[in-house]
Amino acid sequence: MAATLERMPALYLSHGAPPLADDPVWPGELAAWSAGLPRPKAILMVSAHWEEAPLALGATETLPLVYDFWGFPEHYYQVQYAAPGAPALAESVRALLRAPGAPVQDIPDRGLDHGAYVPLVEMYPDADVPVLQISLPTLDPRRLMDVGRKLAPLRDEGVLIVGSGFFTHNLAALRHGGGVPSWSAEFDAWGHEALAARDVDALLDFEHKSPAGRLAHPRTEHFAPLFVTMGAADAAGDLDAERSVIDGFWMGLAKRSVQFG
């Protein structure tokens, strides 16, 4: 299939852990989502699992994956995803983001981590779309929205911008009981309503304005990619074109995933 150059949507997805592949429902949800999208020319991935400042660009050629998890069965460390690199996209990202006082660094030996490849295996299983991963340079929501706004022109070049995190993420709290904890359900419902209401100010200040915000996200890294996605949507006037594509819970965590545009 030829890649399209129509404006691509911007996505925030809950990426799951390696056992996502064994879930009876979730892989099909991701596959159906990608099947309904325009064919991307390339994918720009921002994962919760790579924090690096100043902002860094990962490998621009196919490299081994980063198995950044511990204690799982051996077959999860055998997963391969040999997507092509995206050197032209890297050049465009540098041009959009590099400015006086705002350097962009290259880490050419950094492959895709599980926040990138785990969902992509389900969405683009043929690994035939070039992928570039960039780091989270900060956890400040406002600064991340700024990054997303600067990256927004890529959407008109056929680039699918994906923020990969988890809508709720507190693994330590999950160890104290089963089912869906109240803090996860309450935060998910609040976040869904805030997104539907386009309440950007509330989302930016989620730690104080949401129920159980600090329990749902004791650190911000899994919610942070949402703000890159929102910035890319805001710059294109697409915040009003938001919809939840996937909802529900996995091991007590909200897997809500949204599309703008």
Image (spheres, helix red, strand yellow):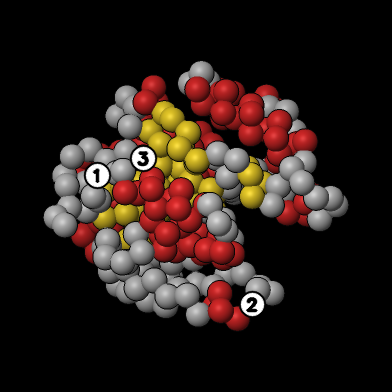
Marking on residue 78: none
Marking on residue 38: 1
Q: Residues within 10 Å of mark 3 (few under 14, many from 20)?
A: many
Q: Residues within 10 Å of mark 1 (few under 14, many from 20)?
A: some
Identify the residue at horizontal 49%, vertical 66% (top origin): 113
Question: Is 105 above or below relative to 177?
Answer: below
Looking at the rendered structure, the secondary structure element under dot 1 is loop
Identify the residue at horizontal 65%, vertical 73% (top origin): 72
Residue picked out by circle 3: 10
Q: Nearer the viewer, residue 150 or 75?
A: 75
Q: Work out which quarter of the rendered image holds the N terminus and state it.
A: bottom left
**In this image, 181 relative to 47: left or right?**
right
Q: Can see residue 232?
A: yes
Question: Which numbered disc flags the more N-terminal residue, 2 or 1?
Answer: 1
Looking at the rendered structure, the secondary structure element under dot 2 is loop
Residue 191 placement (x, y as % from top left): 59, 30
Residue 186 placement (x, y as % from top left): 71, 31
Q: Nearer the viewer, residue 72 or 45?
A: 72
Q: Nearer the viewer, residue 88 or 71?
A: 71
Question: Which numbered disc flags the more N-terminal residue, 3 or 2?
Answer: 3
* Amino acid identity at mark 2: Pro
* Amino acid identity at mark 1: Pro
Residue 49 placement (x, y as % from top left): 55, 59
Q: Work out which quarter of the rendered image holds the C terminus and state it.
A: top left
**In this image, 25 relative to 217: left or right?**
left
Looking at the rendered structure, the secondary structure element under dot 3 is strand
Compute the Cα span from label 3 to label 2: 33 Å
Identify the residue at horizontal 50%, vertical 40% (top origin): 246
Say if mark 2 contacts mark 1, CB within 8 Å.
Answer: no
Compute the Cα span from label 2 to label 1: 35 Å
Say if mark 1 contacts mark 3, CB within 8 Å.
Answer: no
Marking on residue 73: 2
